[in-house]
Image: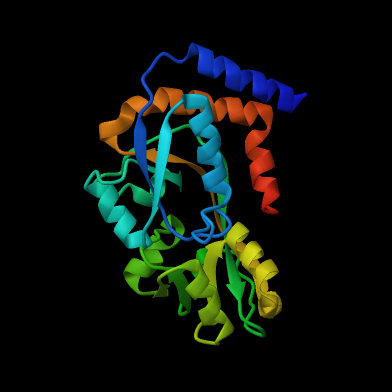
């Protein structure tokens, strides 16, 4: 029944829209299973494919290293970035404007073999070095990083972060739970890792450059159509991720 409702919603959206179709530049970075550069697949790719069908707009996707993506957004060279929590970017030059939330990002600690310890609050990490992806912001840890109580060691991507943990170059990393679970399933040697405690849970939206804020009403409407029909849940589920 939900699939039928979704199909009808797609047809209605196509009939009702009168705005001219536009092309929006989307910034991606390799972030499996959310964005998978090899094969141009992943959760966010499929999400934008469906949003394109509903809105009539075209989303032109290009992959960048994360730090470069942030700079391009500031410069207006990227119009759209999916999967962003407003608190992560509020200190950037151009924070952007945001759609209604469409999903969640849950950040967890992952430990190397024999390195696990219980973390009830961020203060339990005092004196430790945490592996993170360069350019990522963690509101819960900002004060600890700024004071030097907790040290960060940056990798260029989640893939490199997991590889560094496997090589013993780090004892613990902070990573998206869905990314960690997907990586462990894809790489058998990662099965020795210990999945630890949750350090943050965020409702994520689509970040839009202020120069393209006219996109938001149709984008919000399309996201709500997909949520009501169960389409977003189905897309996540294809990659073994639950919302």
Q: Look at 50% across and 39% down and name the residue there.
A: 48
Please state, as top left, top right, bottom left or bottom right, where the C terminus lies in the image: top right
State the image coordinates of residue 179 (x, y, percent, origin top left): 58, 61
Is 49 on the left-hand or right-hand side of 146? right
**Residue name at image x 47 percent, y 61 percent:** 30
Instruction: Look at the picture and state if 87 lies above or below 152.
Output: above
The x and y percentages for residue 169 are: 50, 86
- Front one among 170 and 124: 170
Compared to residue 185, the image places residue 212 above or below, namely above
Question: Residue 67 appears at what percent x and percent y?
Answer: 32, 61
Viewer-side residue, 74 vs 79: 79
Q: Residue at x 65, y 46 (%)?
A: 236
Which residue is at the front of the view, 23 or 169? Answer: 23
Left or right side of 139 for 210: left
In the displayed structure, 180 sits above or below 114; it is: above
- 134 to the left or right of 115: left
């Amino acid at each position: 029944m939900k699939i039928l409702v979704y199909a009808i919603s797609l047809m209605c959206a196509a009939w009702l829209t009168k705005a001219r179709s536009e092309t929006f530049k989307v910034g991606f970075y390799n972030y499996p299973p959310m964005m998978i550069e090899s094969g141009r697949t992943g959760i966010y790719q499929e999400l934008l494919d469906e949003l394109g069908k509903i809105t009539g707009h075209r989303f032109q996707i290009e992959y960048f290293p994360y730090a470069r993506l942030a700079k391009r957004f500031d410069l207006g060279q990227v119009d759209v970035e999916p999967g962003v929590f407003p608190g992560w970017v509020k200190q950037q030059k151009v924070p952007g404007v945001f759609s209604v939330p469409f999903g969640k990002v849950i950040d967890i600690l992952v430990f190397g073999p024999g390195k696990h310890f219980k973390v009830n609050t961020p203060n339990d990490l005092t004196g430790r070095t945490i592996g993170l992806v360069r350019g990522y912001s963690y509101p819960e840890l900002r004060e600890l990083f700024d004071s030097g109580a907790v040290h960060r060691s940056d990798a260029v991507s989640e893939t490199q972060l997991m590889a560094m943990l496997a090589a013993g170059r780090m004892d613990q990393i902070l990573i998206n739970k869905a990314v960690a679970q997907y990586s462990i399933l894809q790489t058998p040697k990662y099965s020795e890792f210990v999945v630890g405690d949750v350090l943050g849970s965020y409702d994520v939206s689509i970040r839009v450059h202020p120069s393209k804020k006219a996109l938001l009403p149709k984008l919000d409407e399309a996201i709500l159509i997909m949520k009501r029909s169960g389409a977003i849940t189905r897309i996540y589920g294809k990659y073994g991720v639950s919302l």
